[in-house]
Amino acid sequence: MKEQQLFSTVEAYIRQLFAGESSGHDAEHTLRVYRTALRIQQEEGGDRLIVGLAALLHDADDRKLFNTADTLANARAFLSAQNIAPDTTEQICAAIRSVSFKGTDTQRPATLEGCIVQDADRLDAIGAIGIARAFAYGGAKGRAMHLPDQPPQLHMNAAQYAANQGTTINHFYEKLLLLENLMNTPTARRLAHARHLYMESFLSEFMDEWEGRR
Ligand code: ADP
Ligand code: NI
């Protein structure tokens, strides 16, 4: 099957899988990660088919939305229906497993394809889009935007990070501001820098307004 045709099929599958999801974890997030991952792949190399499919399927079995995280059943069902070869399927699944953020337990993916998809996923969590997603997520979970007497919790491991129910502003200090330095590829580090500066300027403006300095 031609690349374009395969990606149209997976796009339709993703839109149906994430229908009704509005916590910042929707089909549009996946499609942005896909476009960013292909842009990074163009500069960094790696297998384009694996990067594209891993990006498109990276949240298809996300623990927060589905109960298939251990088996990657949704991703596997799609790849099998498209007759993707077993070894390619395993490489895509390995890349998908390696992308998620787990606080201090996060590891650098073993393959270039995994590194690229992880970078693309993280780029979508920072900058203007990242700010919007963080507040959308916080709103969906009923979290406070900011509580000045609740300091951020740094250096959380995977379990602590997953159990954390803090404010959205704290999420910037607990995750989003750490991501620039965690980028795997030089291309993503370059893209992350501008987005990082934008978040810093947002936070400084937010605090100025909060404290009545503006
Ligand atoms: P992904 O699986 O795409 O890497 P996550 O599942 O960690 O991302 O989170 C989805 C989006 O919700 C991200 O933009 C992330 O920053 C945001 N988010 C996750 N946890 C929180 C939180 N505690 N407060 C605010 N935003 C959050
Ligand atoms: Ni994602």
Image (cartoon, grey):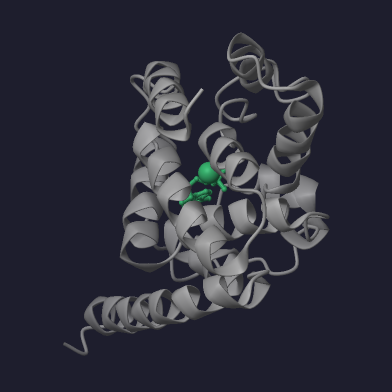
Left or right position of 52 against 130 = right
Q: Is residue 178 left or right of residue 133?
A: right
* Front residue (pair 168, 51): 51
Measuring 69% from the left and 58% from the top, which residue is drawn there? 115
Residue 101, given in percent of the width and then of the height, sits at 67, 52
Percent position of residue 81, x then y = 60, 9
- Is 128 situated above or below 8? below
Residue at 31 percent across and 55 percent down: it is 132
State the image quarter where residue 155 is shown: bottom right
The residue that appears at 49% across and 67% down in the rendered structure is 172
Q: Residue at x 38, y 26 (%)?
A: 8
Left or right: 71 with respect to 131?
A: right
In the depicted view, which residue is nearer to us: 162 or 110? 110
Quadrant of the rendered structure where residue 7 is?
top left
Question: Please, is residue 133 above or below residue 212 in the view?
Answer: above
Viewer-side residue, 94 vs 134: 94
The image quadrant that residue 150 belongs to is bottom right
| Vertical side of 94 occupied by 188: above or below | below
Do we see residue 142 in this rendering?
A: no
Q: Answer yes or no: is residue 11 visible.
A: yes
Coordinates of residue 129 in the picture (x, y in percent): 33, 58
Which quadrant is the C terminus positioned in? bottom left
Q: Residue 3, how many percent across, how many down?
A: 47, 34
Q: Residue furthest left?
A: 214
